[in-house]
Image (cartoon, rainbow, N blue to C red):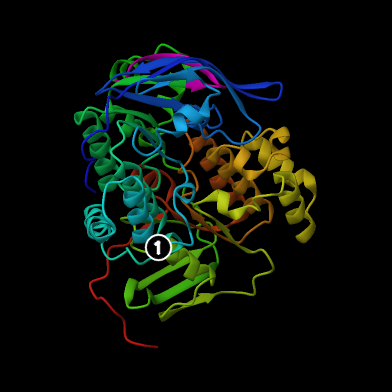
Amino acid sequence: MSGPGAMNGPAGVSVDGLSVHAGGRVLLRGITFSLRPGDALVVLGESGAGKSLLAQAVMGTLPAGLRASGDIRVTGTAGAATDVAARRALWGRGIALLPQEPEQALDPLVTLGAQASRLRIGLGLDAPAMARQRVSAALDACGLDGTADRYPWQLSGGMAQRAAAMLALTGGAPVLIADEPTKGLDATWRDHVVSLLDGVRAAGGCVLVVTHDLRVARALGGRLLVLQAGEVVEQGDTREVLAQPAHPFTQRLLDADPAGWARYPQPAPGPTRIDACGIGRRFGERTVFENVSFTLRAGDRLAVLGPSGVGKSTLGDVTLGLLAPDAGRVLQHGKPRTGALQKLYQDPVGSFAPTRRLIDSLRDVTALHDLAWATIERLLGSLGIDAAMLERRPTQVSGGELQRIALARALAVGPTVLFADEPTSRLDPVTQRLAMSELIAAVIERGIALLFVTHDDDIAAAVGTCTLRLAPPTLRTMPPR
């Protein structure tokens, strides 16, 4: 993935007394900081603390119904936080946002190459004849060669994340806001994204990075701001704060780092739920994976690892029967009842009806499966979800909150086989450990066969009873069926 070109004008952000309100509630209170050329500000905090709201408020993209107050100066343009128009004029060339969800940056109805070309032309960077050539080179540089004619829904989560990063960097904006830029990425691409962010700083820009990954925070350095319940509880030099935290919540974040998790208990062998025998899958002429075999028994926790784009999510879909294999076969033992096979999606926003309240979507599940509402309430409570949150729509809660609501919904149905695609990728370490503990407790108690995708070797080591590491296939195509 190539770095940014020349910066467009002076870099700098100054935020003074920024708050975000929703009706009578204060979601973010009195945030103050400044960034000069070459600076990095890392924002850590619990799920739902307001990290993404901070990024959106600075950018000027707060959801409808939320109101910002305070003052924001970006690249020399000063104004009240409510003056979104002044900042909108800087979008792309003065300030750029890499949102937490790639779907917010990518148009599902336009190919990747066409989107990037239109952006370059619209920003006055290229003539039409030159744009496609430069876009192709940019895609190659971020490991997305051959994807110019693909639509975003044809990409893996990690590939979409890299594509969104490429678009965010296209305009050479001197101020880059990156919201969880490395979620769902393996170690190689995580380090590459950190290099990109460092490249923005080296070119005279500055970066504001929201992350839950302590490795990313340490690698970036700069200054650190820790959020809890919408307020700053600690700030200072990143490496100094992480080495000697002064606030108990910062210490809790460090203590919950997956690198220090104890290994979860091994289950006794249970009955076989799934047998996958030599399965392979391709899309058109592209082989995604081939000759994969495994057995899932009740209580098993099979961790699927591998670089972005090697078919981890596709493997789970084939296992559940959502996709047919192009080679081999998947045997489901017994006759699964309705709802026995469940999937936790990598992108939780895409798994909820966007215009309906969360409580309505969950009540649909209880009605369909004849469940007591108390079942959902208990699971939500154990995952730290306030019942009042269910009155909102999916886009009105944080990614981490929605991820936990999706987990509660899947567990409430009582699955015998659960495919969890990056089930904690949007969670801070404290909430990540809470959610994973709830998931594993259910797996052990109910004898669920769990197939879970993760990019984190530490989580795989602590949680998995066995691992399956996918690698790019050695063959381009497979024999026809």
Residue at x 32%, y 86% (from the top left corner): 479
Residue at x 77%, y 50% (from the top left corner): 363
Residue at x 45%, y 29% (from the top left corner): 87
Few, some or many C-alpha atoms within 10 Å of disc 1 (few <14, some 14-19, many ≥20)?
some
Locate residue 99, reporting x and y percent. Answer: 44, 41
Locate residue 71, reporting x and y percent. Answer: 49, 16
Q: Nearer the viewer, residue 408 or 216?
A: 216
Q: Quadrant of residue 239?
A: top left
Above or below: residue 44 compared with residue 439: above
Disc tally is 1
Q: Main secondary structure of the magenta part?
A: strand
* Amino acid beneath label 1: Thr
Locate residue 33, reporting x and y percent. Answer: 40, 15
Q: Which stretch is magenta?
A: 227-238
Above or below: residue 54 compared with residue 143: above
Q: Nearer the viewer, residue 306 or 8?
A: 8
* Left or right: 153 in relation to 167: right
* Left or right: 317 in relation to 194: right
Q: Quadrant of residue 380?
A: top right
Whether residue 133 can be seen here: yes
Label 1 belongs to which residue? 111
Query: At numbered mark 1, what does the secondary structure look like: helix, strand or loop?
Result: loop
Locate residue 242, reporting x and y percent. Answer: 34, 20
Q: Nearer the viewer, residue 112 or 288?
A: 112
Whether residue 468 can be seen here: no
Is residue 228 magenta-colored? yes
Residue at x 35%, y 47% (from the top left corner): 167
Q: Quadrant of residue 387?
A: top right
Above or below: residue 447 compared with residue 53: below
Is residue 38 magenta-colored? no
Quadrant in which the C terminus is drawn:
bottom left
